[in-house]
Image: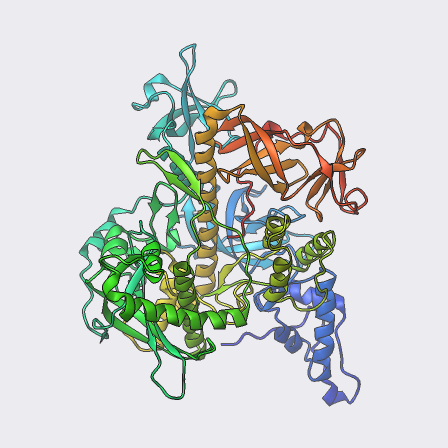
Amino acid sequence: MARRISPPKGKKRPASSAETGREPYLPGREEILQFIKENPDRAGKRDIAKAFNLKGDARIGLKDILRDLADDGLVEKRAKRLAVPGSLPSVAVLDITGRDGDGGLIAKPAEWPADHEDRPPTVFIRASRNQKGPTPGVGDRVLARIFQSADSSGPAYTARIIKRIEHRKDAVLGVLRHLDNGEWRIEPVERRQAELSVDPNQLNNAKANDLVEVEVTKIGRYGLPLARISQIIGSVASERALSMIAIHEHEIPHVFPDSVIAEAEKAKPATMAHREDWRHMPLVTIDPADAKDHDDAVYAEPDTDDKNPGGFIATVAIADVAAYVTPESALDREALKRGNSVYFPDRVVPMLPERISNDLCSLKELVDRPALAVRMTFGADGRKISHTFHRIMMRSHARLSYPQAQAAIDGTTDDKTAPILDSILKPVWAAYAVLKRGRDAREPLELDLPEKKILLTPEGKVDKVVIPPRLDAHKLIEEFMIQANVAAAETLERKRQPLIFRIHDTPSLAKQEILREFLRTLDISLARGAELRPNQFNHILKRVEGSDQQELVNQVVLRSQSQAEYNPENIGHFGLNLQKYAHFTSPIRRYADLIVHRALITALGLGPDGITHKEEEDLPEIAALISTSERRAMAAERDTVDRLIAHHLADKVGSSFQGRISGVTKAGLFVALATYGADGFIPISTLGDDYYLYDETNHALSGERSGKGFRLGDIVDVRLIEALPVAGALRFEMLTEPHDVPSGVRSHHKAKRFTRGNQKRPGGFSRGGRRGKG
């Protein structure tokens, strides 16, 4: 049922201009801002127009006012709604941090932009008599509905808890140390935590240098807190323990409850009920060589319709996880809790147990497997003409790796690819050539940022860091999957079926302005005021291709982009330049895709195990949860790479390396090593005797007297001063002399002066220095 939206308090709904015969009524800027503040979940352009009874020309005037407010930085677009910058969304994940003077719970948002000028707001939790399950307390993470207060004398935000996500144990992760005086101490992984003392009788078989989890047993007025060891993670000398640090630090569920394992083991192979028999179709899987689960298969053939000359029919089949993981089951609850699989160099923390992910749902070669398939018809120009979804039983005709499939196309076949080269692989590649025409015409954002991959020895030690080649086989599968995701979103929107979209907003006005000022130093212009499109960024990237500025500009353009997320409200995907996009192709490792599968099953009548009414109602909460889980996984993966590289370089202190400046901050420089890709930190206080100015726009530090300094993207030589594997931290000394930086640095209004007294950073270390958007 539609909710009636009221104008700001104390205001009557004005009559329309048609009713009065006068000029159209337009609310003032302050009135509109007040309405947006009081109605954060109903503040779209249509909602505002409806609240103030604006029609005809008045709506055009409203559009102009909203554009002015956005240009002035007073409002920002979130999905289809407008919001005051720095305000919280209507549904958010909160961390309960303490209690107020009356004993009520207070919380802060679990995520807050690192580049935001303001501190995260405090949220007061409303008491609820209908709270289900255990009562949340300090240290808990909760999903909550947020209410913005109109009363300036009270709290800015209050919240009603929807559900408790997880309880933070009163546990500390650290390294057990044995001191020369015989005492046992815990050196916490988190540098902000205090050191702990351990009673020798509470060691629980742990040995010196073990990574352990401890519980604090006593905090006295004097001396260190006492703790007992509750779990041994492993020796900190082993790289395999380093990913466990991230798992514990980010509280990633990694042990399946017995009820989940039992439910998975009881699962039986899917039957032909509600399915079409497609086992004759020669679908093939193309994955990384070390992949253990296979959730997508492809096939293509020329379209024989005379009305579509040069066209192709591309088929994508995706593992039917919904057949095994049903709503409200133990498997489903655990999958939602995890949100996605997490990938570390030495292990995977899966969203689903192996019985499901690596067995029943994996599209194994020559084995019958249930799938949800989409058959898409493309014209010769790459434009998708039509598509249909089918619930099928399939049989993969070949399991191929990316290099293997690419080698066959390039002329080097083996026993597996030779028999299917002409019948399967060449038609798939021909279809990709057609799809690529459509992609080229669409012009998605084309950033050139090669991904580094850490290769480990069989013992789990870092062997080397490589940049895997970007093959046409990778691009082919990527484009097939993108088109399948588009088809899923289009079908569900046409059926008016609620779903979770994958959205990516345009860059914020503030980030656009910073990028515009930076590009001006390179004599590159970026249009102001117009609605930015990805091709405008592509033209800029093309201009610097092959130049010394190529990597620098790619990095700065990346940092100007918004964060992609999941949301039941669609605003399109800016980076891919698509209006309708939903994740459909990886339900084994992403909960969002499982929701889309269920939505398709319900919308198309493909069986009884589709999305439920409760899930439809809970989509905003589910989207918030899995967006948070995704960012948690990204942070854990990044931290583990930092620790692995720090561990690998611990015995190379004093050695010199070449690197590239990957970040410039008020406190100093981040430098990524060319060989390893890991970031280390150079404190600003160690750069020399000059005073340094920080210019956010030009991404530079410049000496106040000399005018020389360093800039993002500079290639520099550094010496490794210290490496802390447990913290994942490297500290460098700059060996390269400063150079001339853009002339605007010293006079720019955002440049800030730092003296030696305030250029120091405790410890001089950094964690997670890389700024990838993910």
The one nearer the camera, 201 or 411, is 411
Percent x, y of residue 675 = 49, 38
Q: Is residue 176 in view?
A: yes
- For the point 31% across and 52% down, the residue is 291
- For the point 68% across and 55% down, the residue is 515
Q: In which quarter of the image is residue 252?
A: top left
- For the point 70% across and 84% down, the residue is 56
Percent x, y of residue 545 = 60, 55
- For the point 69% across and 52% down, the residue is 153
The one nearer the camera, 8 or 333, is 333
Percent x, y of residue 382 = 46, 75
Q: Is residue 320 in view?
A: no
On screen, residue 190 above or below 573? above
Outermost front residue = 411
The one nearer the camera, 416 or 773, is 416
Left or right of 174 on screen, residue 13: right
Percent x, y of residue 483 = 43, 70
Left or right of 236 on screen, residue 92: right
On screen, residue 72 above or below 10? above
On screen, residue 663 above or below 285? above
Number of dots carrying numbers: 0
Q: In which quarter of the image is residue 412?
A: bottom left
